[in-house]
Image: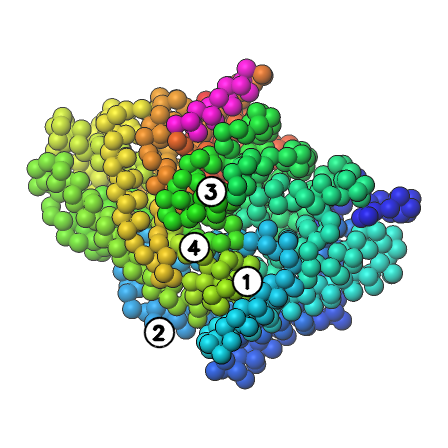
Amino acid sequence: MIASTGSVARERTWDSFDDNRDAIFRRFKDGSYSPDTGASPDELQRMADAYLLENPDQSRILQKANIFRMVLTHGRIDVDPEDWFAEKIDHGNVLRKLTHGARGDQDFGPGLWLEEAAAGNLKSGTDWFDQAQEHGVTTGPRSGLDLGHISPGWDKLLARGLSGLLDDIAQARASLGDAISKDQDAFYSALEIVYGAAIDFASRLSNFASAAAESQPEHSTKLGAITRALSNVPAHRPRTLHEALQFMWLMHQLIEMEGENVRSMGQFDRTLYPFYRADVGAGRITDDHARELIKFFWHKWYCGTEGAANGKNFVFGGQAADGSEITNDLTYLALDAYEELNTPDPKLSVRYLPGSPERLYDRVADLIRKGHNSFVLMNDETAVEALVKRGKTPEDARIYLPIGCYEPAVEGKEVACTMNVTVNLAKPLELALNDGVDPRTGVRLGPATGDASGFESYDDLHAAYITQLDHVLNNSRQHIAEAEREWPRINPAPFISGAIDDCIATGADISAGGARYNSVGFVGAGLANAADSLFALKAAAFDGARFTMAEIVDATRTDFYGREDMRLYLRNRVPKWGNNEPGVDAVAKGVADHFCATVHSFTNGRGGGCQAALFTLVAAASFGALSGATPDGRKSGESLAPGVGASYGLDIGGVTGLINSVSTLDFTETPNGSVLDVSLHPTAVAGEDGLNAFVGLIKTFFSQGGYAIQFNVLDAETLRDAQRNPEQYASLQVRITGWSVYFTTLTRKEQDQYIARIVHAG
């Protein structure tokens, strides 16, 4: 058992989360380590530098594996006596400083190995891409995001432990015999090193916890549980829910230490239900205790982010590989824990399919309307079909996870690289209107497509736009393929590779294309701005001849200076995407269809394909800041539209019109994801009738082929009061893109912009 009744009198274990959460948070952030437990980060860095100097000719993957082992063997460690879970090592990001060099707001400069690659094979062909990023045309793998956006095979790990993976490696070696290549031998050796190191590291933590229990008997129950758990996992299969959670937390931390960002923690209710059911059946744990454990577990993720960007994704509902619906008692118990925890991280995804319980719809909708909005709701039918279209088997597609925010990828079998390229769909139009030149800087970024004032028809304009868009896509594909070919030299990842099918079978790291599915995501941002601008030119310059092309082009170059009449006409009088207007909806669909078809014609640098997506994340603001005024009436520097939705303030047709427009898109052609952002006033979803209407809205979106949808249920007056009295609204959460944050942590400008959007939605 995790706890015994005999320990309760001297140590409060259960029902202790609220008492312990602040102290755990402080200790997690403070990172206090005793010098006698190991080497400091500076000492580890010197050891790593010395190792590289002594072994310059060793393969990159073995260099990384040996430094990984060195850090886990010698780094300072600690265990929090009031927590149920342990992982602490003062690693100083030694490995990340070798690879891509940056993580979140921790900027170490270019990683050593990335710097070497950039000075060598990556140098060619980067001039255009660097300029494109500087001008808001596109972003890529060198813009600060990880290459992988990855999740290991949680089912495999929990079923077999790292010892099971070591057995697989031995069998793979034996089957190859003398035919094993030098690269395969290095890969298997690297896996043996890192898995052995992880098992030994768990033993270090276990021994530390055991000694701490002797010296701190008031914390002996939790420390004893950690001692027992880490004497078993990650080497072997977990025996209890507590051990399974400890296994997952430790694996997450070690994968991130290695240099890949874990973006999804698996299908929580399906993966962990066997452990929960066995514990309850054997009397080892109660539902109340399980909920308490989950709160301690999830608090770790909040400690790591403090509710800032990105977060970690836990998935609920949906189906198993055989197509059976998997919602169970653990689903609802975990949702209860999430409500009680009341933090924006972790973030939760809920998968729905025909046959999903009404209770699941009602429970999630109720949580969202109460302000717990760290949810994205996903349509299994659309997601699975999209993945099957791109070559996944139905069985594999059914176990997809949203990797990151809402990008589907097959759990433990796909390296999806979902954020490798983000393209500003509005920028090619700006280039088409200026003969391939950015009018803000005078820099040529695209091919010459002619003087736009001389275009005689909308077809001429559209052809110029497509030419510019294709130029962006083709150059991006070339750069990505070149970057991926260098990936094994920049960031090999043996620790996670063994947990991804079919790396062990093929003897290849994920960076070398060893996974079963190797994909690259191309994200299209600003669809509404591109469609609205194209349609505005069609309606105002060609069909209606309200203005000439020359007049509109000149006005956009000067940010509509002296032509506010024109800007207001283009913004308010011409139909806009998101209002169920057939003309502009057809233009948006045409842009999306061309973008997706072009992306899907590409191959990547790891032998796989490219996959299209339609969303914006933070690119709405960053691309907007680098884009001039557009013919939809948007002013220079203003944000682009969010997700696949309408431009801010222009969805005057209400939620029904918005969904009808968005449903004209074929989301089975966006296997890399999409999302619709919807804001609702609290009165619209109040009471039983409001809840029924809310659920009906979700079902309507899914029935019309939508993929992912996320909500805010807020009123402007509450947000204004939060500005005036922030101390009273410390836990007020708002959904801003693929994650939620505390409203009071936003800048005043961001808060004002958010309130303006809510006013419009209301």
Q: Is residue 74 left or right of residue 64?
A: right
Q: Is residue 269 left or right of residue 671?
A: right
User: Quick one: 521 or 388, which is closer to the camera?
Assistant: 388
| Of callouts 1 and 4, the N-terminal one | 1
Badge 1, how many Cα within 10 Å: few under 14, some, many 20+?
many
Q: CA distance from mark 1 to mark 4?
A: 14 Å
Q: Which residue is mark 4?
A: 517
The crowd level at tag 2 (other Cα within 10 Å; few <14, some 14-19, many 20+) is few
Cα gap from disc 3 to disc 4, whole angstroms: 18 Å
The earlier-in-sequence mark between 1 and 3 is: 3
Q: Which residue is mark 3?
A: 406
Residue occupying image coordinates x 75% and y 36%: 287
- Residue range in magenta is 689-704
Q: Nearer the viewer, mark 3 or mark 2?
A: 3
Other-residue count near label 4 (Cα within 10 Å), few / some / many at <14 / 14–19 / ≥20: many
Disc on the earlier residue, 1 or 2: 2
Question: Is label 2 in a helix, a strand or a loop?
Answer: loop
Between residue 137 and residue 704, name the one nearer to us.
Answer: 704
Residue 512 appears anywhere in the view: yes
